[in-house]
Image (cartoon, coloured by chain):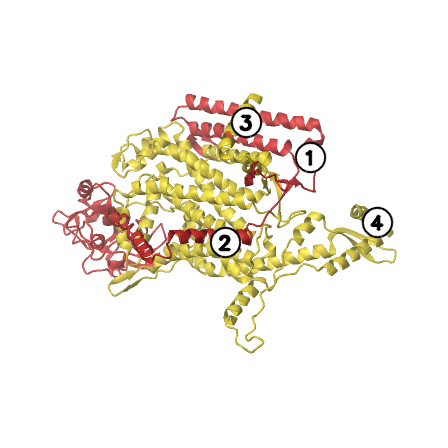
Amino acid sequence: MSEIVRSGQEAPEEPDFAPAEHVHPRRTDVDPRAARRAERQVAILFGLSAVFTLVALAAYVLIPVDAGVSLPLAGPVGALNVALGLSFGLAILCIGLGVIHWARKLMPGSEVVAQRHELRSTDEDRAAAVAAFERGLDDSGFAQRPIIRRSLLGALALMPLPLVIILRDLYTSPPNALSPAEQLSETIWDGGVRVVSDIADRPIRPEDVPIGGLVSANPENLHEVEEAAGNLNARAKAAILLVRMRPDEIVSEQGEGWSYEGILAFSKICTHVGCPIALYEQRTHHLLCPCHQSTFDLADSGNVVFGPAARRMPQLPITVDEEGFIVAQSDFQEPVGPSFWERG
Amino acid sequence: MSAVMNAGGKGAGWLEDRLGNAPWLRRQINKVFPDHWSFMLGEIALYSFIVILLTGVYLTLWFNPSMTEVVYDGSYAPLKGVKMSESFASTLHISFDVRGGLLIRQIHHMAALFFVAAIALHLLRVFFTGAFRKPREMNWVIGCVLFVLAIAAGFSGYSLPDDLLSGTGLRITQGIIQATPVVGTWMSFLIFDGEFPGLAFLPRLYSVHILLIPGLILALVTAHLLMVWYQKHTQFPGPGRTNDNVVGYPFMPIYMAKAGGFFFVVFGTIVALSGLVQINPVWAYGPYMPDQVTAGSQPDWYVGFLDGALRLMPNWEISALGVTLSINVFFPAMILAPALLTVLALYPWIERFATRDNREHHLLDRPRNVPVRTAIGAATVAFYIVLMIGGGNDVIAYNFDLSINTMIRILQVSLFVVPVVTFIVTKRIALSLQRRDRDLLLHGRETGRILRLPSGEFLEIHEPVDEETRAKIMAKADIEPLALPEAVDEHGVANPEAKKGRRRAKVSGFFYKDNVPLPTEEELAAARHHLEHELDEAVEAGSKAAKEIAGQQSH
């Protein structure tokens, strides 16, 4: 006779649950006709689901991917998307509704009660666990052999370092590359670089910019640089705005002689967190960032007049070349875009 | 049917021979789950997550997260010949050339919106009902981490298509990273492999979005569910429901059917909605260009509060000693939001500091019964909502023809005033509801039937509250604020814990001193007696209504 009793094989001491005291019979419990009706409803829902699945399959085969349809509120949308979404959605939904209806109407409707047990183990069990742990610890000698413990902890602390150091080359700088802060501090603008309009990509003459006008522009060499670099990094710093106002409207500029006949060039990149800005109010000469509403006064050195940006919009010194096109006098004299620690 | 059952039984037997799992299985089949509509919020989150995983796998079959420039040559005519990243081009390919691709994309995005919203609401439900109390603090913390991960999952996901809107969002993120004191510039260069936007970021974000974050979510969701299962679900107070039992439906078949059915309902609803509603039409925004932007750009709703914090922050920046500290960017994004979430995660211990309550709680609180907690929650929600309104201030200002500057000023003030007002009002409302509950117990429900007694006296017939309401009200636990500790003990020795104790008593008083206690047994007995007497009088006077009520009472 074996004396071994596995804990799981003991007979349950108490039932898993007992019926609750409060029972409210449903119609389906007392009226067999109602129960049969519910049964039919559930089956109909499952049947509908099957039909909708077939509709979805048919829609996939029959409706061309580029067919459009106009919906009352949504306007013109893809016909296939609507047909597939509706039919497949309903196919899924009907299964869910059917199952829930089945559970609510036909499965036992009264609640049951189960007992909870305190989650904390008995003091004896806890003490036994502690004793076992201490026995294990003792047997390992982890506490008694400090030299092993310390050398292991030291080794474990050092071991992940290669994994960390490898992350250094998340940024692979080419040899002789400028430091990150220096890279952020310069753009591809330089003395004599022509200003070209953003859309037409053509050099601009002063007479192309009317008073009150706003032109989104880039340096002429942008495309070559982008092609060579294979990325848009230069664009993210070099984008500018040209505005023209009557010379007497200019309150101040960031440098003497930086404008040309009332035409001023400012960076287009917000000094807050770097959104490009294009909302310009002619009358007040205010430039408003659409992202966080920083507002700059272009007639007054691009200073911040409102919003979370702390620094003025950098101004690009411009003039015209011998052919009469607007060119930069030099690069920006301060970093464009959002602030950074080393900016000073 | 019986053949299937036989086969199933054989399979189960085969497993049981090897695992000995029958007793375990029996307990799980018979496990009782309480029912309440608010318990479904967490279910919605879980089910949307499953839908997200499913559709996400489909999207990976066609999506190409590359920032290499290509010239678009797909079937969406307006963008033909336009230069864009592979990322954007493959998103267009999924949307216009893959049959059903747009639907999968829309389901994925819609389910993500459901996911974050359901988590947020579930979190509020757990907070306001005190379900985070012992023994469920760990699950509360896991839940808070899941909330953050869900936001990160959403944000990393909608940033992948590289459209103009999401690219602008990434530019803002890069600006925030760059504003980190000391290490910001290098952090940004490491993350983007150089300057913004570079070519490396989207592929990196892709592995974060499809591997790292979902892996973490999956692991934590599993732990979350196992813990719910193991600790058994909490329940709302009601007749027969105590802290020591769980009243509800057994797992098989009812809970299984309801929860399983509900998965299909959530899934089906998301799919049908995705067929009808257009979500994130990236083709309308166009490809991302770092020098272009759309006015009124709005992130998905769950990022709104962060954007609002950036908008409402004053423009403080310190430039000194050759370095720049961008408080205006760094504080709202890297201090405020994480601090808010940390306090949220630690809240169970903050409250325990006031209660020193070490009991297990399986019966949920009605929010009114813990007025200060409820008020703190409401104030936090108010704070969050002001930030969120801040995130959409331009859209609101435009649509309601307001000055954006005035709007921002008002919101800046509101950020401090509205939570305080919300706290006070919520606490008052909760206390009033407590008084009403007490009143209901003592005086019963006013039936609105006025009776004139032969003596000429007018009497309103009061009906004693029904058993369910009574059980609900009586489940309240009256917590006494902790007493001030003695400064010196009976021997005149200074109590070393006095200072800590005083602080604790203060916090405890803040939480519990305004509590409206439940009536005592004597008060209840007296009230019952009074009610019966009144009813008797009314019955004698020939009131039919009173007779009915008295008849119900004697049952």
Return the residue at label 2: B381
Q: Earlier in the sequence, mark 2 or mark 3?
A: 3
CB within 8 Å, label 2 to label 1: no
Q: Amino acid at mark 3?
A: Gly
Question: What residue is rendered at 55% in x and 67% in y?
Answer: B505
Q: How far is disc 4 from disc 1 in space, using C-alphas?
A: 33 Å
Q: Which is more foreground, mark 3 or mark 1? A: 3
Q: How far is disc 2 from disc 3 in space, using C-alphas?
A: 52 Å
**In which quadrant is the N terminus of chain A drawn?**
top right
Do the residues at discs 2 and 1 belong to one chain? no
Res A217 visible: no
Q: Which mark is residue A26?
A: 1
Say which chain tag 2 marks: B
Q: Earlier in the sequence, mark 4 or mark 2?
A: 2
Determine crowd level at label 1: few under 14, some 14-19, many 20+ residues with C-alpha closer than 10 A: some
- Where is residue B377 drawn, in percent x and y? 52, 55
Determine crowd level at label 2: few under 14, some 14-19, many 20+ residues with C-alpha closer than 10 A: some
